[in-house]
Amino acid sequence: MSKQMGCVIETRGLAKEYRMGSVTVEALREATLSIETGSCVAITGPSGAGKSTLLSLLGLLDRPTRGTILFQGEDVSRHSDAVLTRLRARFIGYVFQQFHLVPVLKVLDNVLLQLEFAGVPRSRRRQMALEALEKVGMSHRANHYPRELSGGERQRVAIARAIAKRPSLLLADEPTGNLDSANGERILDLLLTLNREGTTLVVVTHDPHIAAQMQRTIQVRDGRLVSEPASVAQGRVSRR
Ligand SMILES: Nc1ncnc2c1ncn2[C@@H]1O[C@H](COP(=O)(O)OP(=O)(O)O)[C@@H](O)[C@H]1O
Ligand SMILES: [Mg+2]
């Protein structure tokens, strides 16, 4: 039951170069792709291929050197940093391999802080935070500190923090990379459940088992998108 509701994000000719003194690293070249609303997509490729670079551009965490990004149909290339930060805080959830929870804040406060960043009125934050913790099965740990949790539990809290604001796009960079296989499996199941409930999901992974459970796989090699499934080959991802 695929939803055809347009695209959350589209990129055209996206390129990213990192300059370090006289050395330029071309981390991403000519990346043209579309992420359909409601879909789940894996980004795979070897270490150093440009996966995290691509994800951070999709997440509006960084700016491309060239190319354009349409977020919810809007060209964000010329937006100021302040506008990008607001868009990101409101509409994009990000999950990292290293969890990145705030260590001095309790679980509930970690989630509440994100809702504050997202501009959610104070009166609604607590209920939304508790709902998100409930969804990931962590409401019983609301008053614990991150250091009191296992890795798998921390990642569930990180996911709650990312989804509490009900983002239009959930991005995860190697979300199971720091977990054993049983906990990794649980996190993957949780992400897939969130996708079935309507969250658009993009997961960077080098695990073929995870990639196989997504609707689509985008492969990155040496900064280029090198392969595409049949549904995407119809002009959505350009091969250069
Ligand atoms: N901030 C940075 N400064 C300089 N080079 C970087 C930076 N981030 C990534 N790179 C380089 O860009 C390339 C792609 O990196 P990355 O996107 O992190 O790959 P992946 O996530 O696939 O392992 C690599 O050669 C990496 O060393
Ligand atoms: Mg990476």
Image: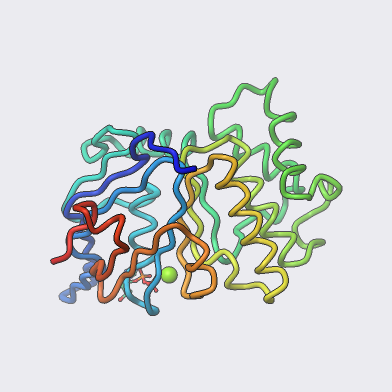
Pick the residue in front: 239 or 136: 239
- Specify the farthest residue to the right: 140
Labels in figure, total: 0
* Residue 15 position in % (x across, y down): 20, 59
At 64% from the left edge and 53% from the top edge, which residue is drawn? Answer: 158
Image quadrant of residue 156?
bottom right
Asked whether, in this view, residue 231 is left or right of residue 166, the answer is left
Q: Quadrant of the C terminus?
A: bottom left
The percent position of residue 178, horizontal first and vertical second, equals 62, 73
**Colour scheme used in the picture?**
rainbow
Residue 138 against residue 228 in the figure, above or below: above
Residue 161 is situated, as x and y percent measured from the top left of the image, at 63, 45
Residue drawn at point x = 48 percent, y = 45 percent = 200
**Of all residues shown, which one is farthest toward the left?**
240
Nearer to us in this view, 173 or 207: 207
Q: Residue at x 75, y 48 (%)?
A: 107
Point 19% across, 50% down: residue: 12
Split into quadrants, the picture shows ligand 1 in the one at: bottom left
> On the image, which quarter does residue 183 sit in?
bottom right
Image location of residue 114, percent across then percent down: 60, 39
Q: Residue furthest bottom?
A: 46
Residue 60 is left or right of residue 196, and the answer is: left
